[in-house]
Image (tube, rainbow, N blue to C red):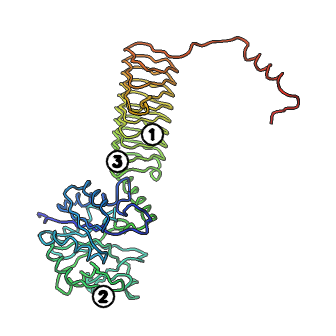
């Protein structure tokens, strides 16, 4: 069956005062992306063709950031916060000309799945005039309750402040996410919603009872409570992060990776992990990371903006910063930092090293304590290390500089000029040895020590 076209109206006008933040609530991040981005992505994956975003006054940043995520999105402003129905009315110009299904989403529900939104669309295609995503919970405090007829049909939603004792005992709750057969259906119901309630607001939830009065069919699509979690505080933001991390870990393990201690590994929303990857405990992976097959990420490593080739080994205690690209079978060891650099196939950077704005050729070995001096106080410069070269321990490579293929750099050198292929480059003071000097020095110190001055 061909699915009808669909429009998503995302409500994001809430001030989020409980977050106690200058940042608009829907722009707080979960798994490395704003909550709003997760909702937009779920909508996209559910093949919803058009999107409207409703924001409040002085929330231009939300609209600007949303347009970066979806350039075709249309932004509307709810002039006064008078409830969810009033917020939806702000998008009236779009509703008046749209013929397909309409879904009402929320910018602070980052865990909503595309599969659940697809179920809403399918229910509308199957004849529902109105669909509500509902969930059951042992603690329904704070949620509107879904009211069912004796035949089990959805006939209303009661906000908690307006609910009777009997209704408060119900544990089938409203997520807030709804679907309507068409823009015309929604507009007709909106026109009949009043504000005769405890908060004197226009509740979109009243649409269910009004739909029943009009002889329209209302359906329920069930979801897990965690999926429709709304974030209104820092504690709820942390709960959303924990839930999404658990989802990401399960997905990555299902796809063939081993997490030695899953609860200690953190992923970003866009992390790509290949097969037969092993990730040890206490690893943090930020946005824009791709990990190839057969990679090992050892404990206590931090990775963001990096691409790791097949068979590479990273860590322990390694840091890969944006622009780090590791080729197949490269080795990055403990206390090594890589930034804006390409590490060639089979190259090794194993200990206590900083490689920034550089290229390291295939099979090159970079010794412990080596650094690329890439910043002169004004601009960054690049270091090129040729394939099969050997950089001795504790060397400083002062960019811009090129080390030729197969060249050797003596340990402790400061290299500021290009080194030709297969050459040896040294830059250190000559060693001087004075026989017996240490013994004479100690004896002189003992003679100069005041009487009675004992070590403590």
**Which residue is drawn at the image coordinates 43% and 28% (left, top)?**
348
- Residue beneath disc 1: 319
Per the image, label 3 sits on a secondary structure element best described as loop
Of 421 and 93, nearer the camera is: 93
Q: Toward which corner of the image does residue 247 lie, by quadrant?
A: bottom left
User: Label 1 neighbourhood size at 10 Å, few (<14), some (14-19), many (20+)?
Assistant: many
The earlier-in-sequence mark between 3 and 2 is 2
Residue at 27% across / 82% down in the picture?
A: 206
User: In screen coordinates, is 300 left or right of 329?
Assistant: right
**Quarter location, residue 306:** top left
Mark 3 or mark 1: name the one nearer the start of the chain: 3
- Return the mark for residue 196: 2
Report which residue position mark 3 lands on: 271
- Is 166 in front, or is 341? 341
Element under disc 2? loop
Helix, strand or loop at label 1? It is strand
Q: Nearer the viewer, mark 3 or mark 2?
A: 2
Residue 16 picture location, percent across and down? 39, 68
Residue 290, horizontal then vertical, whole percent: 33, 42
């Amino acid at each position: 069956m061909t699915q009808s076209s669909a429009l998503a109206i995302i409500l994001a006008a809430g001030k989020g005062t409980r977050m106690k933040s200058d940042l608009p609530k829907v722009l707080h991040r979960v798994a490395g992306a704003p909550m709003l981005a997760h909702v937009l992505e779920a909508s996209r994956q559910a093949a919803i063709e058009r999107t409207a975003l409703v924001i409040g006054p002085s929330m231009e940043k939300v609209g600007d950031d949303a347009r970066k995520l979806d350039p075709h999105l249309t932004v509307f402003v709810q002039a006064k916060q008078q409830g969810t129905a009033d917020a939806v009315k702000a998008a009236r110009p779009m509703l008046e000309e749209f013929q397909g299904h309409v879904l009402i989403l929320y910018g602070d529900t980052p865990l909503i799945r595309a599969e659940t939104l697809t179920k809403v669309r399918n229910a509308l295609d199957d004849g529902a005039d109105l669909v509500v995503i509902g969930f059951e919970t042992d603690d329904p405090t704070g949620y509107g309750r879904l009211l069912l007829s004796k035949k089990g049909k959805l006939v209303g939603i009661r906000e908690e402040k307006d609910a009777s004792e009997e209704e408060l005992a119900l544990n089938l709750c409203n997520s807030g996410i709804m679907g309507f057969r068409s823009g015309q259906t929604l507009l007709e119901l909106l026109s009949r919603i009043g504000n005769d309630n405890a908060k004197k607001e226009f509740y979109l939830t009243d649409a269910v009872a009004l739909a029943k009065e009009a002889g329209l069919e209302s359906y329920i699509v069930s979801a897990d409570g965690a999926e429709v979690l709304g974030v209104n505080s820092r504690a709820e933001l942390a709960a959303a992060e924990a839930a999404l991390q658990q989802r990401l870990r399960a997905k990555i393990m299902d796809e063939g990776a081993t997490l030695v201690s899953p609860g200690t590994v953190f992923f970003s929303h866009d992390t790509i992990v290949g097969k037969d990857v092993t990730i040890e405990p206490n690893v943090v992976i930020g946005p824009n990371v791709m990990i190839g097959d057969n990679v090992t990420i050892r404990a206590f490593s931090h990775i963001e903006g990096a691409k790791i080739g097949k068979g590479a080994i990273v860590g322990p205690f390694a840091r890969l910063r944006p622009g780090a690209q590791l080729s197949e079978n490269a080795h990055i060891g403990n206390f090594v930092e890589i930034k804006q650099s390409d590490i060639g196939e089979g190259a090794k950077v194993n200990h206590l090293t900083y490689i920034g704005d550089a290229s390291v050729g295939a099979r090159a070995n970079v010794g412990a304590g080596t650094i690329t001096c890439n910043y002169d106080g004004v601009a960054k410069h690049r270091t090129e290390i040729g394939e099969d070269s050997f950089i001795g321990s504790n060397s400083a490579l002062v960019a811009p500089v090129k080390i030729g293929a197969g060249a050797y750099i003596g340990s402790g050198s400061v290299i500021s000029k290009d080194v030709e292929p297969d050459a040896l480059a040294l830059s250190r003071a000559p060693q001087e040895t004075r026989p017996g000097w240490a013994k004479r020095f100690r004896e002189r110190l003992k003679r100069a020590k005041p009487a009675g001055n004992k070590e403590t």
